[in-house]
Image (spheres, coloured by chain):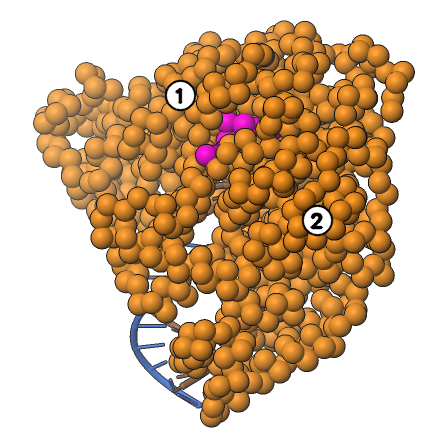
Chain colours: A orange, B brown, C blue
Amino acid sequence: MFPEVAAESPLLQHLNPEQHAAVTLPSEHALILAGAGSGKTRVLTTRIAWLLATGQIGPGNVMAVTFTNKAAKEMMTRLAAMLPVNVRGMWIGTFHGLCNRFLRAHSKLAGLPPAFQILDTQDQLSAIKRLMKQHNVDDERFPAKELQWFIAGAKEEGLRPAMVETRTEDDRRKVEIFQLYEEQCQREGVVDFAELMLRSYELLRDNDPIREHYRRRFHHILIDEFQDTNRLQYAWIKMFAGPGNSVFAVGDDDQSIYAFRGARVGNMADFVREFQVAHQIKLEQNYRSFSNILDSANALIAHNKSRLGKNLRTDQGPGEPVRVYEAPTDMAEAQWLVEEARQLVREDVPRHEIAILYRSNAQSRVMETALFNAAVPYRVYGGLRFFERAEIKHALSYLRLLENPNDDTSFLRVVNFPARGIGARTVEQLQDAARAAGSSLHDAVKSTTGKAGANLAAFVAKVDAMRAETEGLTLREIIEVMLQRSGLVEHYRAERDGADRIENLEELVNAAESFVTQEGFGRDAVALPIDELGATVLRQSPASQGLDPSLPEVNEPAPDYVPPDAETGETLSPLAAFLTHAALESGDNQAQAGQDAVQLMTVHAAKGLEFDCVFVTGLEEGLFPSERSLADYEGLEEERRLMYVAITRARKRLYLSHSQTRLLHGQTRYNVRSRFFDELPAHALKWLTPKNQSFGGSAFGFGMGYPTSRGSSAGYGRSSETFASPPVPPQKAEPAHGLRAGMKVFHAKFGEGTVLTLEGSGQDARAHINFPRHGQKWLALAVAKLTPVP
DNA sequence: TGGAGTAAGACACAA
DNA sequence: TCTTACTCCA
């Protein structure tokens, strides 16, 4: 293919010795320990390009797996830039995306309808709730969320209901519901995310010809972010790894931040042992950050005990110090970072090179408000994504009903939306009828009677008519018809703030349009190939139709380039393909992409990205590290890794901030500065506000502040008081307490001190007092027993 | 019976 | 803040 490309091809230029070694490793199993900013994606993509360019393999012989669509796309883009290959036809994608592709090709063997649909987390939860109601499960004792967690967790361990160990009566009940849930999904022809993985794994495990086929096909299997794989994903990878394959795993144990959803860092050690990995290469040279940032990251992560051990180094100078800011309130914090961001923009930093990171999505609002008020363009990642919005989900439900009338989840979502006189009572009766008849809700409608029955029949007739009407239309036309006939647009037009929703619905048409063109099929395409390369190979044998699993051997490299070909045998309707796309791609890149805007996201979402300037906000005990992680040591280590990820996102400037008070969940919280500050090297930091003693009171200059010790915060109770930002001067002392600034007071624990400032009134009154032996404290006058000293 | 308005509780993340 | 349960009214 590219015979002129020698071992020292231009591809390998600009690689450091470790990267070079990793890229050109012989065909055997390897583990690459790649630190943050060490060029991990580069190594992965160059490795694929090198394997192809040296003619060792063809594009059909590689499988590359990532966790996010973003990472998969990045890999494809970079690869396409290096080599003239049709990356779209290659097996590069997310775990779930590839499993989906696999199951589509073998749906019959997998026991699924060809156009099976995928339940997202929301759908799954509502399916479970529905099931619980039907079977009178006590939702106090078994919250639906918990069951969802339980089911997903079991599947991610590779367990079916019968295989789950039960010790208590509660366990047995949970497994029972798990079993019922499985039956329900099977009946409705839907699969959840975990099922995509598990079903693929089981098919590979139980079907020797299929497994052998893929083993012969994929000579090289490359895995990104290996530290985030769960047990099932690891087992799935093993299915592809035969004697002739090589697995190239890239990971960083210090960036493992998904243990809470089943990721096992231990897979790295298991991999080395079970695959007898001879070559482990560490990439420790960091090309991203200045040393003040890197030193901070290294010092922080050194506090973790369970590590494989790795230290990042850089040739760059120290750069700017890491700036630390303490704010009196979350609003002041937001105000400060908006000011800093504006200053950066004045210094010609592009806005999209400024990232504001936070631990949980709930924290974004204050910052959004501040950015909005300052007229700084910003973009929030995460939160409610395009395909998760209610109006879009409604529209998708109608579309799914067109594709599959037996999709009860979709049926229930829109049976009475827009409202058409079908209430809870009616729906319940319908569900009973369906259950009794063992049929779908759609089919059970026939047996209903009376006025309610007539309403239901009208709904079903409407959808059926829509199906008939959209027959043979393009995807775009189908959606347009659906939007009109369903009454969704009309409904939102009548709503007060429905304009945005209508805009989104229109955007759905665009999304479908770009889906069709992006996938490389013209407007008139009636069918989409499932997988150009895969189908090419499989089509050689009728076995791929799913009945006879005697698949052909594919030792010869697949053709380099297979043009999009509408004539491929196995097809999925554009509608079904689009619905799959909607479930697997949350729609991050939908709308307002490409604007020069400040980037807001959670630390989790920031993984894998890098920016010139990064703000890590809300560094407070209970928030970051989060409350829920503090219970066990491992949780804390994961939080620390999360902080490590946050720090290492920054190239040039890093800002860390925390606030003494924060309005969260409707009430003011008083938070202590995060312990992580104490784990950073002092030489790399620059405190923009005076650093107060850890866990001590505030030494905040202008008198705003609160006691920050955990013990005393309880004494304040609720306070709905909020403060304008930036900090306002303290109110004048309340004479009612009998205290004045400058007065000497006595405290039972802290001894004698001097009142510096007073503020608030009534229950909220507090005093800033300097105790010579204990430093400055903010005390609640309603709680603290203070006696004036003459 | 169904729809709308109001009060109370939850809130890590992502395919 | 957003979602969900409950109550009231047509």
Magenta region includes residue A95: no
Residue at image location 75% in from the left, 54% down from the top? A570
Residue A169 horizontal/vertical position (percent): 22, 53
Mark 2 — on which chain does it sit?
A
Residue A323 horizontal/vertical position (percent): 50, 21
Q: Nearer the viewer, residue A550 or A19?
A: A550
Residue at image location 21% in from the left, 34% down from the top? A712
Residue at image location 60% in from the left, 44% down from the top? A99
Mark 2, Cα crowd under 10 Å, few <14 / some 14-19 / many 20+, is many
Whether residue A535 is visible to the viewer of this picture, yes or no, is no
Element assignment for label 2: helix
- The residue that label 2 is drawn on is A544
The magenta-colored residue range is: A222-231
Which of the 4 image quadrants contains residue B2? bottom left
Considering only vertical position in the picture, is A290 above or below A363? Answer: above
Residue at image location 27% in from the left, 59% down from the top? A140
Element assignment for label 1: helix
Residue A677, numbered circle: 1
* Mark 2 residue type: Ser
Q: Nearer the viewer, residue A573 or A203?
A: A203
